[in-house]
Amino acid sequence: MLLYDNLLETNMGNYGIRLPMSPARSEKILRFLAERRGLAGASEGEDSLAGPPPGSFPLLSLAGAAERLGLDSPLLSRRDLERVHEREFVARLYNDPGPGSLEGELLKTYELINADGSYNRYEPHKALKPLEELFRTILYRVSGSYLACRLALEPNPPGAAGRPGPSRQGPYEGFCFYLGGGQHHGRYDRGSGFCLLNDIILAARKIQEEGRASLIWIVDVDAHKGDGSAELVKFSRDRGETFAGKNPEIITLSVHMASGWPLDSESLAGAEKGRAPLVESDIDIPIAEGEEALYIPRLGEGLNLLEKRSGGRKPALVIVVDGVDVYEKDGLPSTRPLALSKGQCLERDRLIFSFVRQFPSAWLMAGGYGEDAWEPTALFLHSLIMDKC
Ligand SMILES: [Zn+2]
């Protein structure tokens, strides 16, 4: 199952914000698959209820996913946000009376304001739309990760005739890839690194609150450390929070660049806030510059540690933060210290897939920048269609 929506593509210029966005990454992935007959009768976000031909992916829009799951709306609620993030922070996002505002949070999250208060890459006089609308778009994007988890957990809804049954191990049995999501820098009380909210933990906690899953694994292989996810899991653990009256666990694995943002910059910012700036994931695997040949074996070790840490318990759901800014042709200069080849990216994803395929898994697209960022994701999905995993 693939989850995608035209509405996920945001022109930040409409809000007066200039950002180096990846051009049409999702469309390129979908086009690549469609040309190889890897998409089931849905070329323009149209839902396929008739069931796909063998070896292709059904494609759902977010609204289509919500309808299929029997939800009134595809959007997460304010209560859902407050389950994970600080209430005061959420109040600012909704522009409640009081200190702070949505605009202030967006300026910080997208690094649009300099230390002297002047704007950086932000020209509000050129904005065509209000920032409230951007917040709604972000909320929509963030909500898709929850829908992806639900689809992974419920892969065979009534009416989906022709879909492989539970006994057959098809490439999309219990598998959903969301062409969006992966905002792993979203912190407890603030946005960070272009991530306003943490869709990964929002999805995981809602799933747990609804009693749909107990143990959830997060496998984060974006080039950047999943700092926000680690923080949210730790804070919640320290507070002894319960979900659906129980204490369901999230265990986090992050494989990332050993240096660079956020590892280098956060120590200063954290010291200013008077708290430990960078929280450890349950398992952190840093990869230093020039260690690309060690990436796959280290990832394998990380996955084994994840299993070990679970003490024999099986995850009810795995969320994979499948960023491709590790790719050697990625357009973000700061990720150059980690440069996996196309083949290594594919090997990475196939290793994860083969490790987690016995469990429902929701995959989030996460980081990836520049003209070529679509390639590793497209090749991975195509390899599933070709049943090469
Ligand atoms: Zn990244």
Image: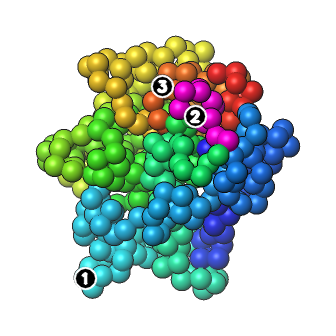
User: Does 119 sit above or below residue 214?
Assistant: below
Residue hosting label 3: 358
Tag shown at residue 98: 1
The dot on residue 86 is: none
User: Tag 2, which secondary structure?
Assistant: loop
Q: Along the polypeptide, which appears first: circle 1 or circle 3?
A: 1
Local secondary structure at mark 1: loop
- Mark 3 and mark 2 lie on one chain; the one further toward the N terminus is 2
Q: Amino acid at mark 2?
A: Gly
Residue 13 as seen in the image, left or right of residue 314 = right
| Alpha carbons under labels 3 and 2: distance apart | 15 Å
Residue drawn at x 52%, y 36% is 174
Q: Secondary structure at mark 3?
A: loop
Look at the image and give the residue range highlighted in magenta.
Answer: 162-172
Q: Quadrant of residue 240?
A: top left
- Distance between mark 1 and mark 2 Cα atoms: 53 Å
| Residue 28 visible, this angle | no
Mark 1 or 2, which is nearer the eye?
2
User: Magenta includes 198?
Assistant: no
| Magenta highlight: main SS | loop
Q: Amino acid at mark 3?
A: Gln
Q: Position of residue 192 (x, y in %)?
A: 42, 56
Q: Position of residue 375 (x, y in %)?
A: 74, 38
Please name the amino acid that badge 1 sits on: Gly
Q: Position of residue 147 (x, y in %)?
A: 49, 54
